[in-house]
Image (cartoon, rainbow, N blue to C red):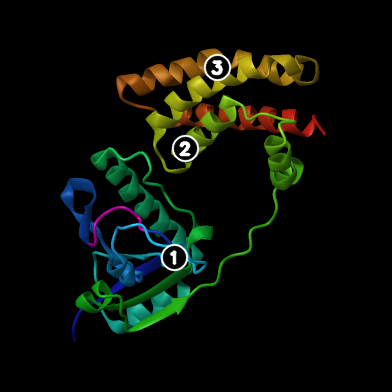
């Protein structure tokens, strides 16, 4: 019997970036850990339209769908082992696959020097499947057995409830509020931190913190304690950024980076909540 391999398959409503193909992802000592298969689906008819201007219509333009299949490099010993694995598999395996896929997208963004290649989130996946099959089978988007998982329900967080994004957007569009540079910089630091990019997170946090301290100063009457706490964290954040420039961030430094980022995010939310 042919060897069986476990996989996670995700589909997104846009082209991910890396050209269609198979990519071997290696870990410690160069050992293969996964094979990522990227495939573009749909929207082939757009090629027939040409590049010349034409009268506008009301029909939506067809868009490509990208499929990413992350295949485990190590096969199962037997089909029973594969079936048992599939029974246990679920959102944890999907989350792990998204982490690996985002690492590939980040490396592609760097290699292509294309700032607009974006990473993905679980909520953006049109389809999420987990299954197993023979090697060539799963590489071509097929399987022996697979399960499709619905979009998980995401509970509202305290921060999301406090910000009320639609009201904030209305305020921004109506010029009753303005976005702070620190808000965008903190978001970038959060993305790096969640993706495991320690050095980038530390460096990003340093400028986000400095921007936040400057931009939040007009709200010092209501945010005084928060600003004092952030000012006290300047030394630790600077040390973390210097360590990043020297090449490494240890676990204790990473924990401090995350702690300060959480406090900066809280201060930025408190400014918005206090404007209601």
Please give the range of residues in magenta: 15-20
Q: Position of residue 139 (x, y in %)?
A: 24, 72
Q: Main secondary structure of the magenta part?
A: loop
Q: Tell whether 145 sits left or right of 230.
A: left
**Visible residue check, residue 76:** no
The residue pinned by badge 1 equals: 61
Report crowding for label 2: few under 14, some 14 to 19, many 20 or more residues within 10 A (C-alpha): many
Sooner in the amino-acid sequence: mark 3 or mark 2: 2
Q: Residue at x 44, y 65 (%)?
A: 61
Q: Is residue 216 above or below residue 7?
A: above
The quarter of the picture where the N terminus appears is bottom left
Q: Nearer the viewer, residue 79 or 156?
A: 156
Q: Is residue 83 above or below residue 60?
A: below
The residue pinned by badge 2 equals: 193
The residue pinned by badge 3 equals: 210
**Visible residue check, residue 274:** yes
Q: Is residue 211 above or below residue 172?
A: above
Q: Position of residue 85 (x, y in %)?
A: 39, 74
């Amino acid at each position: 019997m042919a060897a069986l391999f476990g996989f996670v398959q995700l589909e997104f409503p846009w082209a991910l970036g890396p050209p269609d193909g198979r990519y071997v992802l290696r870990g410690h000592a160069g050992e293969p850990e996964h094979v990522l298969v990227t495939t573009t689906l749909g929207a082939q008819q757009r090629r027939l339209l040409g590049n010349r201007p034409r009268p506008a219509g009301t029909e939506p333009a067809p868009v490509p769908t990208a499929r990413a299949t992350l295949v485990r490099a190590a096969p199962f010993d037997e089909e029973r082992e594969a079936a048992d694995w599939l029974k246990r598999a679920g959102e944890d395996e999907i989350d792990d696959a998204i982490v690996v896929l985002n690492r590939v997208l980040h490396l592609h963004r760097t290699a292509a020097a294309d700032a607009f290649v974006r990473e993905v989130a679980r909520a953006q996946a049109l389809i999420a499947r987990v299954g197993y099959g023979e090697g060539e089978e799963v590489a071509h988007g097929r399987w022996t057995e697979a399960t499709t998982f619905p979009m998980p329900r995401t509970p509202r967080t305290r921060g999301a409830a406090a910000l009320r994004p639609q009201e904030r957007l209305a305020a921004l569009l109506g010029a009753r509020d303005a976005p702070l540079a620190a808000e965008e910089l903190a978001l970038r630091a959060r993305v790096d931190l969640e993706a495991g990019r320690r050095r980038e997170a530390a460096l990003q946090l340093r400028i986000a913190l400095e921007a936040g301290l400057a931009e939040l100063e007009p709200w010092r009457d209501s945010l005084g304690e928060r600003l004092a706490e952030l000012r006290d964290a300047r030394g630790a954040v600077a040390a973390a950024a210097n360590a990043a420039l020297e090449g490494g961030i240890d676990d204790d430094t990473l924990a401090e980076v995350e702690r300060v980022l959480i406090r900066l995010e809280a201060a930025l939310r408190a400014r918005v909540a206090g404007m209601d």
